[in-house]
């Protein structure tokens, strides 16, 4: 009976392709960067409204979200000099530092 169910199940539900779909080229993106008031290091605004020194945790912003996210970041007391930074998203969709 089990083999009958297994055979029937595989007919109605095809196997998934588990391949990771990657972008071929790096895509331009915008993130918010600021200076930590305590340590003086550069930090990046994350999607959960926290700050991270690791750029890969930065929130990639849509064009319509950049201004209000920048205004939000500018009001936070733990950072100063919040600014929009042009960067690139790698093939996995994570922000990468832009080449200087």
Image: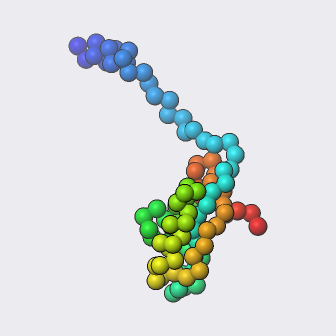
Q: Nearer the viewer, residue 80 or 65?
A: 65
56, above or below 2, in the image: below
Q: Position of residue 38 (x, y in %)?
A: 51, 87
How many numbered marks have been drawn onto this rendered protein structure? 0
In the displayed structure image, the side of residue 17 where residue 29 appears, left or right: right
The answer to whether residue 3 is seen in the rendering is: no
45, above or below 62, in the image: below
Q: Position of residue 42 (x, y in %)?
A: 59, 76
- Residue 60, by quadrant, is bottom right
Q: Position of residue 13 (x, y in %)?
A: 38, 21
The answer to whether residue 82 is seen in the rendering is: yes
Q: Position of residue 70 (x, y in %)?
A: 54, 70
1, above or below 44, in the image: above
86, above or below 36, in the image: above
Point 60% across, 73% down: residue: 83
- Please identify the quadrant where the C terminus is shown: bottom right
- Residue 12, by quadrant, is top left
Point 57% across, 76% down: residue: 82
Point 45% across, 70% down: residue: 50
Point 46% across, 28% down: residue: 16
Q: What colouring method underlies this structural image? A: rainbow
């Amino acid at each position: 009976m089990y083999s009958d169910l297994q055979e029937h199940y595989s007919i109605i539900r095809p196997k998934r392709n588990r391949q990771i779909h990657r972008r071929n080229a790096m895509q331009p993106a915008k993130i918010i960067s600021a200076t930590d008031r305590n340590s003086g290091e550069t930090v990046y605004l994350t999607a959960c409204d926290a700050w991270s020194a690791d750029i890969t945790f930065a929130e990639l912003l849509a064009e319509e979200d950049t201004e209000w996210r920048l205004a939000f970041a500018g009001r936070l007391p733990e950072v100063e000099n919040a600014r929009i930074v042009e960067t690139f998203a790698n093939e996995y969709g994570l922000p990468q530092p832009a080449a200087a």
